[in-house]
Structures are given as C-alpha cells and as structure tokens.
Image: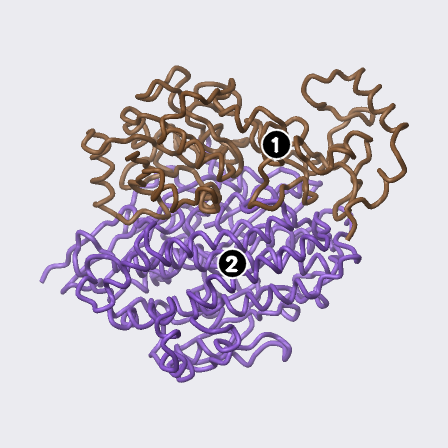
Chain colours: A brown, B purple
Amino acid sequence: MTNVLWLQGGACSGNTMSFLNAEEPTVCDLIADFGIKVLWHPSLGLELGKDLQTLLWDCISGKIPLDILVFEGSVVNAPNGTGEWNRFADRAMKDWLLDLAKVAQFIVAVGDCATWGGIPAMSPNPSESEGLQFLKRQEGGFLGKDFVSQAGLPVINIPGCPAHPDWITQILVAIATGRIADIAFDELNRPQTFFNTYTQTGCTRNVHFAYKASTAEFGQRKGCLFYDLGCRGPMTHSSCNRILWNRVSSKTRAGMPCLGCTEPEFPFFDLKPGTVFKTQTVMGVPKELPPGVNKKDYALLTMVAKDAAPPWAEEDFFTV
Amino acid sequence: MTIQSLDISPVGRVEGDLDVRVDIEHGRVVNAWTHAELFRGFEVILRGKDPQAGLIVTPRICGICGGSHLTSASWALDTAWETEVPRNAILARNLGQIVETIQSIPRYFYGLFAIDLTNKKYRHSRYYDEAVKRFAAFTGKSYELGITISAKPVEIYALLGGQWPHSSYMVPGGVMCAPTLTDITRAWALLEYFRTNWLEPVWLGCSLERYEQIQTYDDFREWLDEDRNHRDSDLGFYWRMGLDIGLDRYGAGVGKYVTWGYLAHEDKYQKPTIEGRNAAMIMKSGVYDSFADTHVLMDQSFTRENTTHSWYDEGTEDIHPSDRTTKPTANNTKDFDNAYSWASAVLHKDFGRLETGPLARQLVAGGQHGESWQHYDPFILDVFKRMGGASIHVRQLARVHEIVKLYRQAEHCLREFKLNDPWYIKPTEKDGKGWGATEAARGSLSHWVEIEGGKIKNYQVIAPGTWNIGPRDGEGIRGPIEEALIGTPIYDSSDPVEVGHVARSFDSCLVCTVHAHDAKTGEELARFRTV
C-alpha cells in the first residue's frame, strides 16, 4: 500500500482536473489496481476541519507513513515571508509543507506553480510565490537546492500548465511498483521519458515547418504556427504531440501556438505588450531558434526550404 | 444552553481554501462566517501586460472553470476592440463552455457532493447501504463510472482547443481552430457515448425525450413513480434519499438570485457590444426576487462591491467594481467583528445580496421577461415554490437538471457549424474598455478590461464565488453561503458534515480570491479582482 497525500498551495486545481481525466489507468484504477491509497486530497478527501488536521499531524509524527507527498500550486510566502496569505487547516500552508517534507519518502511537484512558481510567480510576484525546489530556472526554491526526500531523491518535477494526466499517474505508479530507479531525470529534475523530446515531435504541422510555410493568422487549415504566431513547439520539451491530450488532440494540432508551458520561463517574456501570440523577430528572423541550431545555418536552411517548397505547402492542407 | 463556536478549517471539497465559523445553539447553526484563505494577486500580474494576456492568465485563475474564464476574457476583448465574431466562432466558443459544464456535473455530483451521503451519520437511513454501494469514494459503482466518464465531454473541448483544462483557443475575432469533418464526427460520437453509457441508463433511467417532458413538480413526482428505472436511477435514488435524510429542510440562503445569462446566439452577437448582450443570449440574464416573485434583467452597471468586512482599507461605501481602489491590509488576522476574508461582498444596487449558480439560472429561466425567443423552462421555479423555497436538495436538483438542456445545446452547435465558413476575422487592436461574461457551471462570471496605451490598465473579475462566498456587507447583511448555513442542524460537532453539505451545494470555487497588494510599500496597485 502506497500512501499519497495531495495538497494545494497557490493553486487553481487545474492539475487535479487534468489528473481526473486520466485513462489507463484512471484515478479509480490507481487505487483499485496499483495499491495507491489517497490519504487526502483537497477535491476528493472525505475529512474536514479537525479530522483532517489530526491526519496531517499523524503524518508528521510518523504514525501514518507518508510515501508520496504530491504538491500542486505555488508555495506562497507573502506577506513578508510569513505565508499567511495561504492559510490551510489553521496554519500557513508553507509551515505544513516544511513539516511534511521532512517525513515524505518521495515528493512530487505537479504543474508549473509547484515546480517553478508558475503564473503566480510572474513579475511582480505579489504573493512571493516559488516552486518547491526551483524559482523559474534558478535552483533552490522553497526546500533548497540540496534537499532530498527520505528516499534520497530531490523533488520530482512534473511541469506543465497543467501537467498531462499520464505524466502524473505514471510517476505515481512507478513509485508504487518500485520502478522509479529506472527513470532518468534531466537537469530540472523532470522525468526524461516525458521531457526529452520536443513538443514539436509528432506535430501534424511539421511538414509546414520544414518548408517554412506559415499560418499567417488564426482559424486557418494550413501552415506552421512557429513563424508568425509565436509557437514554442520546437523549443519546448514535452510529449504532448506523441501522447496527445484528452486522447484526441494537442494545442498545435488544433491551431493554437504552444506556449512553452513545461519550461521554467513560462509565461514567456512575462506577457509584455506585443509578446502574446506573436513571434519575436529581428529583421524578420525569429529571435529564438530550435535548440542547437545556429542563426547562419538556419537562414540558409529556410532559404532553401522556401525555394524547395511545393505549391501545396501554401494551400489549405487539412481540408474539411 | 450556551452558544458553542465551531471553527472548521478547511471545509474541503470546495475548490480552494474555505474556512467556516459557525455558532451552534440547541444543535443548530445560529450564526456563520465564511472566509476565503488564499491570495495570489492576479491583478498585479495582469497590469501593464499585453492586452491579450488575460486569455492566457485568467483560465489559470481556476482550473475547474478555465473555459468559462476564457469565454469571458475573449468577449471582453471583443467588446473593447469592437470586433466581428463569425457565426462558427460563436458556436465553437459556446460548445467549449457547454462541454466544460457538462463535464462538471457528474464530476461535482459524485466527486464533491454525493460521497457525503456515505457519512456514518446516515447509517440508519434505509438508503444507506445502497448509497455506499453507489457513492463511496473511488470504489462506488456510480462514483467510478461518473468520475471516469466526466472526462469524455472535455475531449470535445480538446478537439476545438487542443486540450482541457487550460487552452486559449478563443481569441478576439473568433477562435484559433478550424475543425474538419473528423473533429465534428468525433464530437458527436463522444456526446452519444456519454448519453448512452451514463446519462440515460445510469443518471436518468430514461431517454432524454422522456425527461424533457418534465415541466412541473407534479410531473417530476409522476416521472418518479412511473417506472422502476426512474426511481432507481442515480437521480431518482438521490432524490428519494435526500428527502429521507432531510436535505430539503435546510440550506435556504438569501432568496434572491442572479444570472448574467449566457450562450450568445450565433446570429445575434456577431458584432458584440456591452449594451447589446442581454438581447443576444440564448439563456437569458435576470434577477429573481422570490419574496416579491419578480423577474427583471441583469446589467453589469448594477453591480456593487463592499469591503467593510474584507481585508482592505477602502471605506464602507458600495462601489462599482471598476471604481475600486484595491488597498489590502497587510495583516490578515481574522476579526469576526471587522475583517475576516479576502472575499469582498458583492451586491446588486437595488436587490442587495444575491445567490448565483444553477439554481439562480433555473429560477430565472422560469421568468416571462426577456426576448420571446430566449430559452424558457418553468420546472425548477415550480419545484422551488412547491417546496417552500431553496434548500440543499433543490439546489442540487437545479445543478443536475441543466445537463439535459446543455446536451441539446451541444447538439445544436454541432448541427449548425458550417465547416467552410470563417472561424476568425482578424481584428484591429485598439485602446478601450470591454466587458465579457458567461455562466460557469457554478454561477455568474464576468471580466472588466481597460486597455490604455496598448497594454492592460485595469482588469477585474467577479466570479461566482465572489457572489456566494462573500462576507457581510456594509449593512452587516450575511453573504449567501453564510445565510444558507443558518438553521443547519449539527448532529456531531466533531464531524459537521451538514456544514459541508451546505457549502458544497453551492459548488464553491474559492481559488479565485486574489487581490492587489504590494507587500513592500502597501500602495495601491492594479484593480483586477477575483474571488
């Protein structure tokens, strides 16, 4: 039996809602077939008030073993480091978190707010929010750079706004079935199995990317969203287009630019005027290129690609 | 008999952190205070940002009704930029809003509400064993099916927007997507799957057509007695058990109700304006005053806010949301005589405190006001009158009653799409003021936006929770949930499940309680507000 306690800080419940969309396994399967016991969850837990407070103290005292602590939402430190702007069960949430982090075997940060601080930590970060072990790309966060949980691992980061349900369920199952040691993590403590490839990997618009055929405006059935509409698919690590969302699609397949939400810089450029759904360019060339591509080679490549592009690359492609 | 004060922190299974204090005398609640306990500061974040930042940021106010925030955010920009929105795009926005709410109904009913029917308090009810079989968390037969199948409707959202939650596919001027035959066919199939695997056999025990014949309280009782499948469906079973355990006997509230109306008519709102909105909505706006039994239209200009009992230093006057100067107090200590919540008190300038949500929508739907073509449905209003007003039970019935009509609206959208017509008309960005609104599953949601010099000057949100969870107003009048708690029987003060029932019957969404505050200087920042 693997005990899971799920808490929320500066959260919107988006990751919870995403988690509830899980299939193979469903949330109920997790419990019935994988021996996971949800001690409490803000949207699903039975206890309220004093009963819940007792349960939390029992986890802290070791009376109830805490195998996995899942945290959703940012760690709120306002005002002035007290955390009083996010009170839960009669205490500042950050105080609960500090106590529970000392006893948890594994800690899983779910979603951007818990991993890097996310939207609440966007400039000027009024709630003094941070992630569990990072603030944006900077290591440290709430628990500190050197923190490891009882099982000897740093916080496992599952970013995304929200995180994909499969990323959450598969990590929980990996821990519950003793497979977590097989999983490699990247420099941001993200499981590589989900975050080694790019969001563009598997995008149905790849061929348009290759021929530099652009989607000039929304609501069209052709082109790539990278050149004009600010799509971050080529620069973002995720398996979105390999495993799809809600079993059916992805943002880029549906015609929405990727916002890069699995990366610590999300939302990019702090959404300053002129940066939303618009590619940032210098002399017509995108400021940011796919990782590992240098500007000179890129210019050459696109020139050739444009010349080689067949006429159909500029026509409606995904027709009715 | 002395008064016992009970502090419940947290209530749980409401979205966000809700704490409640109740005073109990002779086993009943005689006074109540609700306080919202989370502050994130979205208003500060949005100020000075790109005009379209709200399309990305506001869905993240709330992951439960993110599509509703997106709907409001895009209509707000449409009115500010004076865009033209093609017919297809109106339908595609409506469909997103509809399937998000359809998803929410089983997810809320089984996940957040019905599991309390398995509380030990009810072990003597003759329905108890069956309730455990159906509704027990994670293992109940209906719980498991309901939670799992609730993921299906939002697959339709993902066909339009790429994913749910948190897509930003609605933009001023239309939508980003251009669905094809494949998308529309799959969406139909998903709707049908939802209908044939849960909605008809498990939830209703009958066809949609049979359920739609129910127009009055008597019709409903007749339906219940007509067939074993009706009685034994989850709806029939819940209705009978609720009466048995007295859910119809408490949780009344303020007796006055509000809805903005929603689902823009695809032919009547292609040139969206703030003034033209009321006459263009399929589901009409309105205020229902049950004491006078009157229906009138609702307008954004009637909204007022009061912060006498909230953690702000802004005087004691009622002001329009766009006139607020958000000045929070750094010290958010609970003081029940003064300030005790991040929520403000929202009022109607003439009617005072109003309840919002499915019950409000359905009571308004029974009114004769508005346009002759707008949706009309007398059922819940009749139930309300016959059962002596609101209660937990009537509120729940209204919540689940909407699923069939929303299903029909979803069918309408799918039928009406003309795949080769435009989905987007590129607008010209400009400065100005805009307002957009919709009805999230749990009630009235609206966004006010002001754009100046090509960036957001002021962005404000009033969410369902702002109406329902608010503290006392300037005159000391309780907010809707506080009022609904009065008279609640408390069987066991160490497990006040009844308080949970009342709070959850509003399907409250607290994750939106955010206000502007610069911790370093305490000076006024933006005026974007949500609760």
Task: Please tell me in which quadrant of the rendered image residue A9 appears.
Answer: top left
Image position, residue B347 (x, y; %): 45, 62
Image position, residue B484 (x, y; %): 32, 64
User: In this image, B72 relative to B118: left or right?
Assistant: right
- Residue located beneath label 2 in the image: B101
Tell me, for residue A181, which label it has, or none.
none
- Taking depth in this image into account, of A308 and A153 the one nearest to the observer is A308
Pointer 2 local density, CA inside 10 Å: few below 14, some 14–19, many at least 20: many
> Do the numbered discs 1 and 2 sit on residues whose CB atoms are within 8 Å?
no
Task: Inspect this view and state whether residue B352 appears.
Answer: no
Q: Is residue B309 above or below residue A118?
A: below
Residue pictured at 14% horizontal, 65% vertical: B26
Q: Amino acid at mark 2?
A: Thr
Q: Amino acid at mark 1?
A: Gly
Image position, residue A314 (x, y; %): 86, 40
Residue extending farthest left: B1
Residue extending farthest front: A33
- Which chain is mark 2 on? B
- Residue located beneath label 1 in the image: A260
